Amino acid sequence: MIGAYDFSVLDTTPGAAKTLLAALPGEDASAYRLRLREAWRLNPQVRQHLCIYARHLKKGRLRIAGPMQDVITDVLRSL
């Protein structure tokens, strides 16, 4: 079954629904960045989602929320 995703919003809040990119409870910025790198390497779905979010960010169609918004913004801009 294919899930539906809203790629106009990226919420990094721990426990955020329907996102592979939410932070874990108590996770700091360096641990979050490291986990994203590992997920990029191992999970094609994470790679696809990051690329889609990066494209939306470049077009000004992405709203980022949560405690890791600065980290994820840097990651997306680097793609």
Image (tube, grey):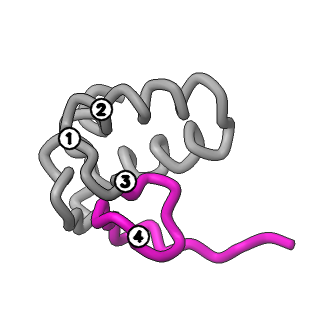
| Amino acid type at mark 4 | Gly
| Amino acid type at mark 3 | Leu
Circle 1 is placed at which residue position? 28
Q: Residues within 10 Å of mark 3 (few under 14, many from 20)?
A: some
Residue 33 quadrant: top left
Q: Estimate the x, y position of residue 47 in percent, counting from the top left.
A: 56, 37
Magenta stretch: give its range.
Answer: 1-22
Q: Residue at x 34, y 53 (%)?
A: 23
Residue 8 quadrant: bottom left
| Residue 47 lies within the magenta run | no
Q: Secondary structure at mark 4?
A: loop
Q: Estimate the x, y position of residue 58 in percent, counting from the top left.
A: 26, 47
Circle 3 is placed at which residue position? 24
Q: Residues within 10 Å of mark 2 (few under 14, many from 20)?
A: few
Q: Is residue 68 left or right of residue 79?
A: left
Circle 2 is placed at which residue position? 31
Dominant secondary structure of the residues highlighted in magenta in the image: loop
Q: Residue at x 52, y 55 (%)?
A: 20
| Residue 18 lies within the magenta run | yes
